Amino acid sequence: MNDRYLDFTHSPFGKTLASMLGLPTPPRLRRADAAWAAQPFADGAILVGGDSKATLAAPLLAALGASGAQLRIVPEHAGLAPLKAAAASLGLQLIGNPAPSAGERPNRAIVFDASGLSSPAQMRELYDFLQPLVRGLVPNGRVLLLSRAADACTSVGAKTMSTALRGFMRSLAKEIGKNGNTCNLLEVAENGEAALAAPLHFFLSAHSAYVSGQTLRITTSTAKPVELAGSLAGRSALVTGAARGIGAAIAEVLAREGAQVIGIDHPSQEGALGETMARIGGRGLALDVTATDAAQRIAAEAGGLDVVVHNAGVTRDKMLRNMSPQYWDLVLNINLAAIIDINEGLLKSGLNDGARVVCISSIGGIGGNAGQTNYASTKAGVIGYVDAMAPTFAKRGGAINAVAPGFIETQMTAAMPLGPREIGRRINSLSQGGLPQDVAEAVAFLASPAAAGVNGQTLRVCGQNWFGA
Ligand SMILES: NC(=O)c1ccc[n+]([C@@H]2O[C@H](COP(=O)([O-])OP(=O)(O)OC[C@H]3O[C@@H](n4cnc5c(N)ncnc54)[C@H](O)[C@@H]3O)[C@@H](O)[C@H]2O)c1
């Protein structure tokens, strides 16, 4: 569904009226229009900084150097020494002029390595670096912070500052969202450095247009690091609920990345499923995910799977006092029990080594909603489930993660009454609903073997929705 208010505020009259009345003007987000590129930032520059004790300069610069970006620095800041040492050892050039002149590549992002912060006084180094730069961010620019995950911190001070950064990141994301800018935080656990490149590329690129205010933890992995570009080519991927909406977009983005997609949907949706699969060159399987033999039928149809995306989901909203057992059971069975049962079956037979699973949660499961005790139970349950199952998948060289969408423009949200729909759209830092593609981009990132260091986590794709924030 079109966001008419967004379109209106970008017309000459609408822009003037919104400004006169002090109404928000949602930015037009720059979204990816092609597959992951090998050199995603070849047309831009990235400003890099860090604190004086930062420890991630080498993997950070190696990843950014490989991305094709020009690397700019602020010549007088506390964290120059680690950056210069890392650049020298990697043979990379750092350009000592933070502001591009006319005709030079624009600064598309600012990346700050805050992995060495260990006291409030030292946090001033972050302030000194970023404060003068924020105003110069281009629309749809990115701020990305790096820290040590709390369990990789060796002192109370370091652990405190690692958590302090989350508050900083969330607040800055709220400040800069009105221009389509995002701010996120990568927390790097012990030996997680080897898996840093793909998360950096995802968060700095247009593939993460609707992801802001989020923290992602990067852990060590036994899987060999690979680049995002081309990483899903030839992989077999299953998507449930693929006939329409978010599931169709996930199937489409996985196909765009070269995966061989098998889409599942309820037998009542066989026609729509066939059309979607024909459009993306995938195969359809009409199947109720709650069928007792669902896993066996999937394994028989698919052979070995590299990627499984559990997207099929329903709502049956009622206040608990009015909720029928039928509504309760239907939602619990489709949104949660089917995921657990299918995974259990596929873990016995049907998954290739290194298989990656992505489950769709919801911010409804994080913030809760009146009338959704059934739905929110399932979507919160998914978050606990991926956390609990992460070691099982890690042992096979794979991973299981969740994506929690916020307000996404689909048939489901188009059916909402006007008032709640408008509120749902605007109460986030980007002042608009996301598109199914935004969820699909995050799913594809987590489905890729390049995201090897991400396991057991839930990534929100919600424009930093203020629910459950
Ligand atoms: N739209 C949003 O704003 C939003 C927000 C948060 C989470 N989500 C979640 O994203 C997922 C997709 O949502 P959507 O908005 O695209 O919904 P949708 O209703 O448009 O699509 C869901 C698909 O799942 C299929 N499905 C339902 N029951 C099934 C079953 N038993 N077996 C097989 N297929 C079945 C449906 O036929 C449909 O094609 C859901 O899990 C939903 O809870 C959506």
Image (spheres, rainbow, N blue to C red):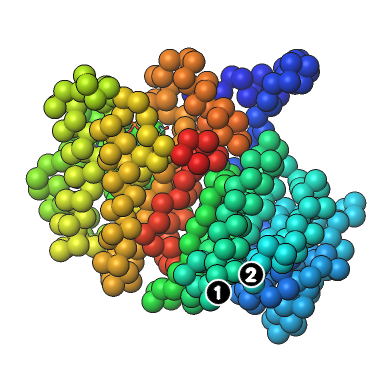
Report ligand 1 position as a quadrant. Answer: top left
Residue 56 coordinates in the image, percent (x, y): 62, 73
Name the mark on residue 432: none
Q: Residue at x 28, y 72 (%)?
A: 395
Quadrant hosting residue 203: bottom right
Q: Identify the residue at the far bottom of this view.
A: 89
Q: Is residue 241 above or below residue 105?
A: above
Q: Earlier in the sequence, mark 1 or mark 2?
A: 2
Q: Which residue is mark 1?
A: 155
Along the line of sight, which residue is nearer the eye, 144 or 241?
Answer: 144
Q: CA distance from mark 1 to mark 2?
A: 8 Å
Judged from the image, the secondary structure of the residue bearing numbered disc 1 is loop
Q: Residue at x 46, y 55 (%)?
A: 445
Left or right of residue 447: residue 147? right
Q: Residues within 10 Å of mark 1 (few under 14, many from 20)?
A: few
Residue 163 coordinates in the image, percent (x, y): 55, 59
Q: Which residue is mark 2?
A: 118
